[in-house]
Structures are given as C-alpha cells and as structure tokens.
Image: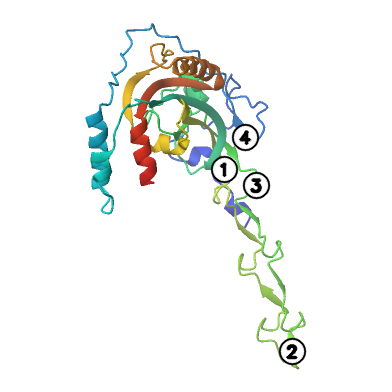
Amino acid sequence: MMDEMKAPPYDQFPGIAVCPTGPTQENPGYVPDEYPGKEGIVMPPTAPPLEMPPQGERMPLVDLGTLSDQDVREACRQFVSEHCCYGRRFIRDTLLPEIFNGCIYHYQLETFGEKRETVDRHEPFKGQYIDGPQNGIPPQPWDIQVPILSLFINSQVKVEIPHTAYVKQCGRCVGNCRVRCESCYGRGGSSCISCNGMGRRDGQQCTSCFGTGRRRCWNCSGSGQVKCGTCDGRGNLRHFKLLLVTWTNHVESYITHTFKLPKHLILEASGKEIFQEENPRVFPINHARDDSVNEASKIMIQKHSTAFPQELIRQQRIPSRVFFSRELLEEQTEN
C-alpha cells in the first residue's frame, strides 16, 4: 500500500518539462539573518535612500482674522439655539469690554512608509507551473514593482517573488503521502473497553468488538496511517519566496497651549485648516505665527527622517489646523 501511494515522477505531470528540485541560489535579500521575534522572516537590505526634492514655493498661512463683539454674540446665539432650555438674555445683557482672540495650533506630521520582508512558503505540488531560477535570477526585494493600495492608510500585500519556486519532497511524509495516525499512534485501534480486550463478555461474544478484542480506529479505519496534511497526500511540495509589503502611516502631533482643555477634545474638533502640504518629503514650516510650532515642525521632520530605517518613505504631509478658544469651549460644553 505504501508504494502505491507514492507520488508519480515529475515528468508525468502535464506541462512540466524540467522541474527544479533544489533551492534557489543564495542572493542578497533572501539569505536568512538574525531577526528576533519573527522566525522565517528575512529583512531585505535597508530601504534605498530617497533624494530630497528641491523646496518649492510654500503655501501661505490662512489669515485667521479677529473676532468682533458681533461675532462672539452670534456664536453664542447659535450655541443657545441648539439647546432648548438655554436662555438668550445673557447674550443681550452681557458686556464685552475686551475680546481675547486666543487660538490653539495643532500641527501634525504624517509619514507614510513602506517596509519589505521575505518569507519562505510552501504548498502541495499538484502539477502547477514552476517559475524557478531556470527562468532567470530572482529580483531584489526593492526592485519588485508593487503598487500602493492607498496613501496614508495602513495596509499589507503579499506577492510571490518571481523565479524562486522549486519542488521538493515533503519532509513530513518523506514522499510516502501518508503519515502515522495520531489518534491511535499507528496501531490501527485499541483494546475494546467493553470486554477489556478478551473478545467475550459474560460468556458471550462481545457485541462492541465482535469478538476481536480490539476496536478499529475511527480516524484511519484501522490502517494506522492517514493522508499527509502537509502535502495533501501528493508527496511533494512547491516551495517559493513570498514578499511581504507593509505600508504604515506614522502620525505625530504637536498642540500649543490648550487653555486647560483636554487634548483629546482638541484632536476630535474640526477647527480651521490654515496650512496643507504633501510631497515625497516635506520641509519644516517657518512662517507660523507661533514660534513653538516652527520649532516643533523642525524637530519632528528631523526625527521622522531617521526613525524608520527599514522603511522607504513614500509620502509625507503636513495638515495644520487652528482652533479659536470659543469654538473649543463650545465643543467641550457639548461633550
């Protein structure tokens, strides 16, 4: 039975003239190295450097303007109209001797990076086409064209690396297509518990084992072997290299003085966008009214330029928003 279950020779599979049966050549990017925590995953060489584009004309900051007495009262009326039990008298009677046009700046830097890893994979060989090294040298991980699914959104794709496939005998069943049954440990059954393996019970033939003293294994039907699950009973595996491409959007924020408001409320507020820039690499802003924003922009961009050495920076963007203090007070009251 064992000989009958062996896989046929490679030349018996249709469409396969010559089937490679050894691993691909060792080439940079596919040789396993020390990478703790991720067994089987290989880190390709460091991402290629990205040239800094020339700095073009910067988008001017949106003029914030100032709030007049009428603007403040109109905002209060709008707020009161959204609450049925709030009165309007204080809006008419309250004096506003001085208006403080305070605002909060929210500067945000987003760096969209791409990381590439390679990993060994295998599947049952069922006669499918083998794209092995006989078709050419496998390309380097960073030379493979993989389109970005969507900018600034975390995602991952898996791509089979060309010319890395080969066929090899299944290591679990050693090409026999069958392995030992784990339910009966290859014995094909066990002693009958009804008659303790005697075949008779109370002077009568045991009805559970029909006098044999053994009960046949339900999993292997008494053969002691089952189909190999690794190769699906084929005897051979198709090995190949898989490229894992992971896109990660790294977000970092800086908020100026918050007027004692919780930061999570500021991050959730809509505010008013005063500056927007998106390029493969962005430059620090230097024309914000608050000098602390300019300094934070410089520090964060410098940090992101070296914080992800295994990733290739594909795109960066800077959305900057401003919140008038009255807007934030309204939103805090609503929450």
Residue shown at the point (50%, 28%) measured from the top left? 132
Q: CA distance from mark 1 to mark 4?
A: 21 Å
Could you tell me which secondary element the residue under label 2 belongs to? strand
Q: Earlier in the sequence, mark 1 or mark 2?
A: 2
Q: Position of residue 238 (x, y in %)?
A: 53, 38
Q: Which residue is more in the foreground, 123 or 296?
A: 296
Number of the front mark, 1 or 4: 4
| Tag 1 and tag 4, C-beta contact below 8 Å | no
Query: Distance of mark 3 from mark 1, alpha carbons?
Result: 10 Å
- Mark 1: few, some, or many residues within 10 Å (few <14, many ≥20)? many
Distance from Cα at disc 4 to Cα at disc 3: 18 Å
Three-letter amino acid code of the residue under disc 3: Arg
93 left or right, relative to 2: left
Instruction: Give 172 or 318, whichever is nearer the viewer.
Output: 318
Query: In the drawing, what numbered circle is on residue 172?
Result: 3
Q: Amino acid at mark 4?
A: Gly
Q: Which residue is mark 4?
A: 40
User: Callout 2: few (<14), some (14-19), or many (20+) C-alpha neighbours within 10 Å?
Assistant: some
Which is closer to the viewer, label 4 or label 3? Answer: 4
Which three-letter amino acid code belongs to the residue tagged 2? Arg
Residue topped by disc 2: 201
The residue indicated by pointer 1 is 236
Q: Secondary structure at mark 4?
A: loop
